[in-house]
Image: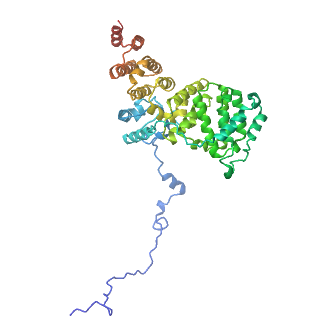
Amino acid sequence: MLRSLKGLKGRPLSLRRGYSVKSPILFVPNETIHRFESEKLTEEENLAAIPKRPNFDGLPKYHHEILSPEDTADLVIRPDVNDILTSTFSQNAVFTGDPNYKVTPANANLQETTLSLHFAVAVIEWIRLFNTQIVTLKSLPSTVNKLQHINEAKVDAIKAKLNSINVEELKSVEVLDKFYTSFEIYRKGDIMRKTRADTINIENISSILLTSELIQSDSELFDITLRYLGLKLAYFSNENLQQFTEKLINHLHGENITSGMKVQSFNNFMSKVFEIHPRLKTELHVSQLDKLAYLFTLANNIEDSKSLLQLLVTNYKVAPSKETFNLFLTKYTESLKDFQGLIKSKVLKDLHQLKPVFFHNGLDSFSLKFLLEEIIEHVYDLDHLMRLIENKENSSIFLLSEFAEMLMQRLQVIQSTSEDPNTTKALQLTQLISKLVKDNGVKLDKKSLELAQQMYKDLGDTSNYEYIGKLLN
């Protein structure tokens, strides 16, 4: 009978075998032992034996720094699948397929650069992110009229005192100050709660004074009053200042003011208000911001107007009114007259955040003329401008009919500096005319046909030159 392998407590005995060595294991580098004298090298010989790093300069480079799509400035381009294919299969995988086409960085310190996208995946992702610049905007809502209790006794008291003073006397800062202080309003920040309903505050007086017929007809008095209030902003509570600002904006915008002095006075006053209360911009209703941008533009305050329009688009996703936006483009164009440098680059860097507005509102005669004259310098840009015009179905035919000659003139200017062969230029002209006539039903007038005929003649395209000649006859 086999002997049991279990111990006294019922556990099996270990079957693991042990190992032992007579001497410890040593880890000694080979270069110290078991080495022949002929194998030993000096330090210099060892360094010389290390092979030099190969030179890869002559090999094609597959990693390129590219401009981030979010940091690219543009106003009219919205690439699609055709642009993906063109960029992917073009030589050196350049964006648009033309190595001379340059994209504009939004960073003011960076220069225009050629964009190469070497892999289809990179092209698709870059264009997808680029098109996220065109956010969906909401139309500007109507002004929200807040319900405010009007204390008739207050109004009557203020008007009675105002009528008792000579207008010319109010043009004195001392008399104006006495007029305000006579209502016992001077408690900085706010008035006491127990007298709040009955006390006449600075907002009550200013609202009635600045909307009165006396000031409406007197720009000098309006200017003096706003300069006085600019020194007394500490006496407005935050709530009262917002209410007064909204009333003043509504009043001036609805008045259709033409006085340059009034506009400048308002501009100077609002600059002081925002300097002391910068958060007021975010507290105003979007319709008030739109009106304020309009008034700033009238005062040629382009930078503050632009910042308000950008606030509407980026923060609130709301498109400004066409009235405000077209006025801004008018004044902005006037500001470019004295600029020395690349107009297209400056315009794109300045206005790229307003790109969604062009796609939301669609183009009208003025915005189309602005884009055509200021930023269209390449056939690719012109093609995308045509697509943008066609997006507005109701008026695209009207716009294209009105601007057909100007579109061909712009193509002629672009081709005058292009290195494309004449056959390519003739094809570009034919494609433009085809889009106008065949795709959109535009009937070219005599001047447009004569321009097209002359362009074909200059390009040596006799067949199309003769064909248009028959149309003219």
Asked if 30 appears above or below 236 in the picture, the reply is below
Instruction: Looking at this view, name the residue that lies furthest to the right.
Output: 174
Q: Nearer the viewer, residue 88 or 305?
A: 305
Q: How is the image coloured?
A: rainbow
In this picture, residue 77 sits left or right of residue 224: left
Q: Position of residue 453 (x, y in %)?
A: 39, 12
> In which quadrant of the rendered view does residue 455 lie?
top left
Q: Position of residue 401 (x, y in %)?
A: 40, 18
Q: Nearer the viewer, residue 143 or 98?
A: 143
Residue located at (42% from left, 81% from top): 22
Residue located at (77% from left, 32% from top): 172
In this picture, residue 327 sits left or right of residue 210: left
User: Residue 247: in sight, yes or no?
Assistant: yes
Instruction: Looking at this view, name the residue that lies furthest to the top.
Output: 473
Q: Which image quadrant: the C terminus? A: top left
Q: Position of residue 250 (x, y in %)?
A: 58, 34
Q: How many marks?
A: 0
Asked if 446 appears above or below 54 in the picture, the reply is above
User: Residue 59: in sight, yes or no?
Assistant: no
> In which quadrant of the rendered view does residue 262 lie?
top right
In this picture, residue 232 sits left or right of residue 321: right
Q: Nearer the viewer, residue 140 or 165?
A: 165
In this picture, residue 33 sits left or right of residue 269: left
Residue located at (61% from left, 26% from top): 257
Instruction: Looking at this view, name the residue that lies furthest to the left.
Output: 1
Q: Position of residue 201 (x, y in %)?
A: 68, 43
Q: Which image quadrant: the N terminus? A: bottom left
